[in-house]
Amino acid sequence: MPVILQQVSKSFGDVRALNEVGFQVGDGELFGLIGPDGAGKSTLFRIIASLLIPDAGSCMVLGFDVVKQYREVRKLIGYMPGRFSLYMDLSVEENLNFYATVFGTTVRENHDLVREVYRHIEPFRKRPAGKLSGGMKQKLALSCALIHRPRILLLDEPTTGVDAVSRREFWEMLEKIRREGITILVSTPYMDEAELCDRVALMQKGGILEVADPAEMSTREEVPLFALRSSSEVYPYLERIRKQEGCQSAWLFGDELHVTLKSKEYEPLIREEIGRWKEPSLEWVAIAPSIEDRFMRLIRQEQEPDSGHGAGIKYRTDR
Amino acid sequence: MRILYTLLIKEFKQIFRNRFMIPVIFVVPLVQMIILTYAASLEMKDIKLALVDQDHSTASRFLTSAFDGSPYFKIMFRSEDEREALRLLHRDRVDVILQMKKGFGQELYREGPMDLQLLINAINATEAGLVRAYCTRIITGFNSQIRPEWKAGGGLSGNPAVEIIPAFWYNPEFDYKIYMFCGILVILVTLIGMLLTALNLVREKEMGTTEQINVTPIRKYQFIIAKLLPFWIIALFELGFGLVVGRLLYDLPVVGSLWLLFLFAAVYLFAVLGIGLFLSTISGTQQQMMFVAFFFMVTFILMSGVFTPTESMPGWAQQINVINPVAYFMRVIRMVLLKGSDFRDISRDFYSMIGYASVILTLAVTNYRKTT
């Protein structure tokens, strides 16, 4: 197991950023940390990257303790911080060469590994890093994190603030890197990206809600899920649906309402009720729950049972 | 070594890619060396003089013409009326009043005590001191010239007058500019070394680039050396540049050894860069850093003896100057350049500076934490 976390806790003053977090990442796995802003993802990354010392618990990276043997750990990981941290006043090429040399290697030596990523930014290799677009900055940062052929790649929200096309490209690149045998830990607030991971850990308020295969995760949902769609605004119906007998919970999901029922028996009753509203544009269908639905329900279980949608989850607008 | 070399190359690239740097290194010092040297100069010309001659004797006319001929004085007012002269002094129209009472020449002839009054505006004490010194010089000259003449005419033998001929060593022309220039140069080199180092380090902190650097195998000491060395070189270059400018503009004499000066500067700059590093560790943003640096710099500079000799400061102030690095360099640069002191003369300052640099660098490096 390349990464083993046990009961890791970290506080900043009164704020408990991480609360007894523990999970393991398997060899060659693409592991996702999913959660809203402030869930503690970045803190966790900084601990794994040996930049932050946990208050309690232990974190082992490829058999090395991140606190005591941080020097070994740093040779083996490639870390891409959430905030762009390369030199803005150095060119693309200079940044890449700099990080290669610092790790005692050359760009040529590992060119095959970074080629896939680097070819996108190669036409701009003389341009200062500060003048690149968001997507290109991410690709440069990924190239620099990869240039010494790390065993583990730590990517803290690599696609936040990046356009949809670049995001898709980025995930395709990750898939290729993984095929090189590099274990990848990636955090994201986007639910659709979670489904591209081998396994994900759902994080909320410094704790882990669940660790599972995203495909399997949605089948774990035993409560039937329905969607109410409309060609116009669907939001006005939220309170009406919630008042129905048999409705367990309802929340806004993108531009539709997702509804769970206490049991299947209530379904015909609600369908009839909606029919009585005389809104021909309304559409009521049974749907397969996504990982996002799972996450929403888990969060609501943690908090009070009937809070609406939200918890800072970002929706893709280009779905 | 390879890592260090890479870091240094990177650092130099960044420094010279910064558009703000070239003016800071070349233009700003040049402007300062030209403007400040004159502005801070204590040399005075055209001292406004009011002459109150109530005697109208040969002697008084002789003294008047002595003042008239001096390049330092400009006679603004001649009269017998001392009250009018006083009024002008009150209104700041004249700097000094020379009053020769009736009987001045007579007294002189009889070799009795002369009565001569000098009223100097002493709002600026330094200026007043200078005015007094200039006046005394002229009056002494007058004195030594007039006596033999009278003696020859009157035949009275007086006591052989003891003549004081001052010789101004190390600065025969009494040129304040070169003295000031040395001080300005020290300030410039210190500013460049301390501020640029601290700014650069804090900027790296602000930009968040240290986050990425910290996960590399770069060691703490390598990072610090790569940060300090460029500014050490730039500051030493600045010293050389300043000396050339001084030579061209002010005919700066270089009596002592330049090697000795640069050797001392090299050690001195380690202390200065250490302070810069220390400042960067205690501040999170460039603004905070500038504020703290401003406080230190103003204190250091004003205490260093750039305008006033440190020897004239109260005892406790001189004690404080033990921890003021600028005071050491201020003393040494003048000793070496103007006086031609050799290593033995400055050895005390030199070893103190080595100790100082070691302490401040240790403190700064310890304070600089690579891991939180």
Image: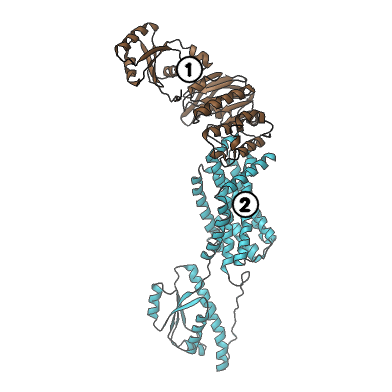
Residue B1 place in picture, x, y as percent:
70, 41
Chain hosting mark 1? A
Q: Is residue A246 above or below residue A15?
A: above
Q: Position of residue A274 (x, y in %)?
A: 32, 12
Which three-letter amino acid code belongs to the residue tagged 1? Ile
| Quarter residue A97 falls in | top right
Question: Which shade is chain A?
Answer: brown
Q: Nearer the viewer, residue B6 or A139?
A: A139
Q: Are marks 2 and 1 in contact (CB under 8 Å)?
A: no
Label 1 element class: helix
Q: How is the image coloured?
A: by chain
Tell me which chain appears cyan: B
Q: Quadrant of residue A169?
A: top right
**Total numbered badges shown on the rendered structure:** 2
Which residue is denoted by mark 2 in the rendering? B234
Residue at 63% x, 71% y: name it: B169
Q: Which residue in the protein does label 1 denote?
A: A291
Q: Is residue B61 above or below residue B165?
A: below
Residue kind at label 2, given as amino acid type: Ile
* Left or right relative to B75: residue A77: right
Furthest residue in direction top, as rendered = A265
Chain of the residue on which disc 2 is drawn: B
Q: Is any part of residue B366 visible from this angle?
A: yes
